[in-house]
Amino acid sequence: MHTAVALVYLFLSSLTLAVPAPQARQCNSTSAQVTINAQTNSGMSRPPIYSPIRVNIGKLTPCAPYCQVSAMLIDPDSGVNVDANAVECRAYRDRKGLVPGSAPFTVEEPARISTNIATEGSVLCYVVAA
């Protein structure tokens, strides 16, 4: 009886060895991204001080922990797998993207959020022109 069990065990274990291991998936694509220059000093201050925020296109990007800004604009030379001139973004006051915090902005038209400093929680960018 023990011999029969041992033979069944050997047979079953040999089957599992015959199955090839799954191959790791390799993804060579990089998601489309742009950089937003967030003005971190008062909108009335000169010169303006900018802090970059990297944003994936089509994905709500939270500001960590929040952005203290007076203006935002898309860096025209920052597109990765996308033409930055074809992108529009919008800031939101909350991290869930429910409460608008700016008008839509582009490379040519920045978001003038406040003459002082306002708090933004997230940013969403999307392609609007090809």
Image: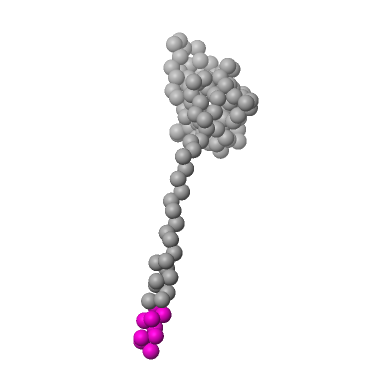
- Can you name the residue that lies furthest to the front here? 18
Comparing 3 with 77, the one in front is 3
Instruction: Reply yes or no: does residue 44 show up in magenta.
Output: no
Query: At which x and y percent is residue 126?
Result: 59, 30
| Residue 48, quarter of the rendered image | top left
Query: Viewed as shown, does residue 84 lie left or right of 7?
Result: right
- Can you name the residue that lies furthest to the top here? 46
Using the image, determine if residue 116 lies above or below residue 93: above
Q: Which residue occupies 46% across, 48% down?
A: 25
- Name the quadrant of the N terminus: bottom left
- Name the quadrant of the C terminus: top right
| Residue 129, quarter of the rendered image | top right
Using the image, determine if residue 104 lies above or below residue 28: above
Q: Which residue occupies 39% across, 72% down?
A: 13
Q: Which residue occupies 36% across, 86% down?
A: 3
Q: Is residue 72 visible?
A: no
Using the image, determine if residue 47 lies above or below residue 11: above
Query: At which x and y percent is residue 82?
Result: 54, 28
- Can you name the residue that lies furthest to the right here? 129
Characterize the magenta stretch by its predominant secondary structure: helix
Q: Which residue occupies 44% across, 11% down?
A: 47
Q: Magenta residues?
A: 1-9
Query: At which x and y percent is residue 43?
Result: 51, 15
Instruction: Reply yes or no: does residue 8 show up in magenta.
Output: yes
Query: At which x and y percent is residue 46?
Result: 45, 10
Q: How is the image coloured?
A: one colour
Q: Is residue 33 visible?
A: yes
Give the number of callouts: 0
